[in-house]
């Protein structure tokens, strides 16, 4: 149980490789673009050295020890040698993923776990061409996985509990924060909650109730302050003298009244969306330079926050 294979070496494949190497696993990276996996390792080495310099490298091993665990392969069979766990990170296209898993299954032993990084496809679709679906699941990371540790484990209807347990233990061992869904659902948990937040924020701006800048402050200076440490359930549990049930006795009716006043699913593309985009671009212009600067700021803040979370 020492080798993990990562299939696809783009943004997410590289991040997973870093996370698994930080846990001391040999990571065998495959990409169907020749030379791409080797490129990924060069890029990872650079990142790990920077992280080490900033004292933010994860795991017990040094950057050079961790990069020594990585190998790149342009041949799928070779990449899968000795692996007990395969994390797929190819393009988000159903046919591509189905074909990749079909190919992988022919090359691995019957106990090897097949895991997909898909954000938007349910396991029953992704694994429809795999013979033995009991060893398949989705392990959905959040970008960037190196700082945002959540992983949603989503079973196929046929996935065995042992496969969920082994993956949960692996994710915990490499320092991620796994959660289990009991069955598959479109959007999983994170993207469903995120969709609700986006939709109501969009409606409030579109209906002229609040500005783009201020709705973002509602999250970053308000709800988000708590949500980095406690979720919505603990939040309500702590917000009434006798906990969750007491909260609902006091505020349940008000909550239902507000929810009943929510508008329909917004049209995210029409005339209204242009004015929201314009307002956003006045705050942060949508050229590469401005966006890259904000992405760097976001990742630096996430790094600092993950440090704070580790201490508490
Ligand atoms: N980017 C995110 O924010 C994010 C977050 C969570 C999950 N994901 C999921 O992770 C997966 C990968 O996303 P990404 O952002 O890293 O994409 P990406 O485009 O950066 O990387 C995809 C890589 O897969 C390789 N590839 C494509 N087809 C292949 C094949 N048949 N065999 C081997 N390699 C192949 C490509 O050459 C490329 O290097 C997607 O399913 C995506 O939904 C992405
Ligand atoms: C199917 O996969 C499970 C879980 O890895 C394994 O225990 C079982 O032996 C496999 N069955 C066959 C027929 O290969």
Image: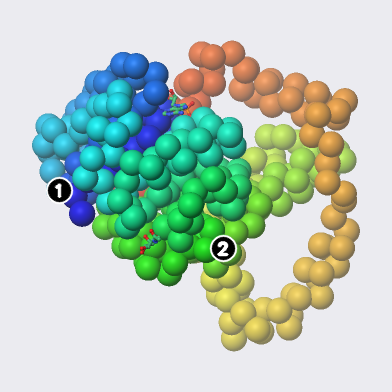
Q: How is the image coloured?
A: rainbow
Indicate which disc residue 157 carries: 2
Which residue is at a point 30% across and 51% down the rendered structure image? 109
Name the residue nearer the viewer: 120 or 63.
Answer: 120
Above or below, 54 against 188 in this view is: above
x then y, percent, for residue 141: 45, 46
Give the quadrant of residue 106: top left
How many residues crowd mark 2 within 10 Å: few (<14), some (14–19), many (20+)?
some
Q: Is mark 2 within 8 Å of ligand 2?
A: no
Quadrant occupied by the N terminus: bottom left
Q: How many marks?
A: 2
On screen, residue 45 versus residue 279, left or right, reads left
Q: Which mark is residue 40?
A: none
Gap between marks 1 and 2, in whole Å? 37 Å
Q: Is residue 178 left or right of residue 77?
A: right
1 vs 2, front mark? 2
Q: Going 13% across and 43% down the picture, which residue do you hit? A: 61
Could you say whether the residue bearing mark 1 is in a helix, strand or loop?
A: loop
Image location (x, y in percent) of residue 271: 87, 25
Question: Could you tell me if residue 168 is visible in this image?
Answer: no
Q: Does residue 267 lie above or below 225 as drawn?
A: above
Residue 101 can be seen in this image: yes
* First of labels 1, 2 by sequence position: 1
The location of residue 163, given as percent across then percent down, is: 39, 62
Q: Please provide percent x and percent y for residue 237.
A: 58, 76
Q: Nearer the viewer, residue 75 or 52?
A: 75
Q: Which mark is residue 60?
A: 1
**Element under label 2?**
loop
- Quarter occupied by the C terminus: bottom left
Q: Nearer the viewer, residue 162 or 292?
A: 162
């Amino acid at each position: 149980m020492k080798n993990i294979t990562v299939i696809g070496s783009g943004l997410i494949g590289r991040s997973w490789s870093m996370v698994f190497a930080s846990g001391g696993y040999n990571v065998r990276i495959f990409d169907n673009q020749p030379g791409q996996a080797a490129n990924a390792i060069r890029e990872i080495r650079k990142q790990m050295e920077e992280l080490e310099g900033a004292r933010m490298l994860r795991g017990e091993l040094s950057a050079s020890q961790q990069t020594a665990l990585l190998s790149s392969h342009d041949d799928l069979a070779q990449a899968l040698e000795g692996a007990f766990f395969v994390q797929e990170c190819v393009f988000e296209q159903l046919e591509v993923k189905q074909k990749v898993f079909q190919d992988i299954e022919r090359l691995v032993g019957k106990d090897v776990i097949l895991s997909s990084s898909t954000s938007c496809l349910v396991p029953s679709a992704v694994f429809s061409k795999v013979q033995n679906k009991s060893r398949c699941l989705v392990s959905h990371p959040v970008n960037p996985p190196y700082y945002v540790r959540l992983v949603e484990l989503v079973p196929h209807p046929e996935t065995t509990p042992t496969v969920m347990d082994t993956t949960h233990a692996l994710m915990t061992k490499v320092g991620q924060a796994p959660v289990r869904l009991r069955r598959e659902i479109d959007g999983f948990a994170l993207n469903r909650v995120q969709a609700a937040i986006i939709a109501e924020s969009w409606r409030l701006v579109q209906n002229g109730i609040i500005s783009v800048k201020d709705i973002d402050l509602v999250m970053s200076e308000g709800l988000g302050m708590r949500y980095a440490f406690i979720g919505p359930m603990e939040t309500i549990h702590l917000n009434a003298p006798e906990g969750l049930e007491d909260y609902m006795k006091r505020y349940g009716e008000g909550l239902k009244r507000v929810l009943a006043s929510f508008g329909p699913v917004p049209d995210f593309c029409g005339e209204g969306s242009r004015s929201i985009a314009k307002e956003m671009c006045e705050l942060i212009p949508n050229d590469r330079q401005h966006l890259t600067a904000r992405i760097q700021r976001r990742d630096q803040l996430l790094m600092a926050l993950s440090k704070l979370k580790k201490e508490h």
